[in-house]
Amino acid sequence: MNLRRMRIASTCALSLLVVVDVLATCGGGGGGGTGGMASGSMAADVVYQVPWKVINTPDSAAGGLVMYWFPASANELQKSSLRNSRTLSLYAAQCVTMGVVDATTPVGQKLLGDEKLPVAILASADGAVIGKAQGENGMLKVGVVEKLLDGEMKQREERGREQRKS
């Protein structure tokens, strides 16, 4: 009699484990993700944080292109739309250095000249200025910076295609 009870208890326990495992992802299908619980309107937004680093000296920026951001204030630095951008994050992963620079540093004085803050300056690794994005009303909008960098990257890509054809 004890053996029969143990078999029944074991069968029930195994059944319970299988049911719990299937229900753990709201219908099965593997782990991860939202488990089928999120609808289209409840999906979490993906945030692409731009890996800005502080640049104090010209040699702080390593090779490739450099996007120098000169914020007008600490408030802009904290609340700027430049902190989160898919485009800038993707280019940062492609050897474009993203640097925040204080206008009073030697790098800032060399690149800024008479520019009014905030401004972003795209430069080559040797410090040659390629383009500038000006801010308005004390804030620099991410779209202006993305457009500047995206335009330069597309030009470089086109030049590369032309060189391969020759």
Image: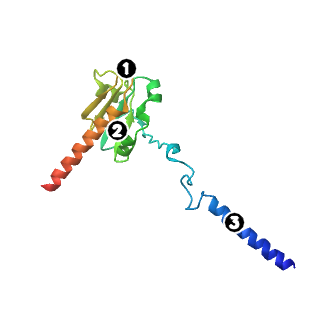
Q: Residues within 10 Å of mark 3 (few under 14, many from 20)?
A: few
Please tell me whether mark 3 sits on a helix, a strand or a loop. helix
- Can you name the residue that lies furthest to the right here? 1
Q: Nearer the viewer, mark 1 or mark 3?
A: 3
Write the residue at 74% across / 68% down.
13
**x and y percentages locating residue 21 in the rendered image:** 64, 63
Determine whether label 1 and label 3 are within 8 Å by CB. no
Front residue of this view, candidates 130 and 140:
140
Q: Nearer the viewer, mark 2 or mark 3?
A: 3
Badge 3 is on which residue? 17
The amino acid beneath tag 3 is Leu
Determine whether label 2 and label 3 are within 8 Å by CB. no
Please tell me whether mark 2 sits on a helix, a strand or a loop. helix
Front residue of this view, candidates 27 and 115:
27
The amino acid beneath tag 1 is Asn
Asked if one can make out residue 125 in the rendered structure from this viewpoint, the answer is no
Badge 1 is on which residue? 137
Q: Residues within 10 Å of mark 1 (few under 14, many from 20)?
A: few
* Vertical placement of residue 97 versus 72, above or below: below
Q: How many marks?
A: 3
Q: Give the mark nearest the N terminus, 1 or 3.
A: 3
Asked if one can make out residue 86 in the rendered structure from this viewpoint, the answer is yes
On screen, residue 164 versus residue 13, left or right, reads left
Q: Residues within 10 Å of mark 2 (few under 14, many from 20)?
A: few
**x and y percentages locating residue 148 in the rendered image:** 28, 35
The amino acid beneath tag 2 is Asp
Badge 2 is on which residue? 59
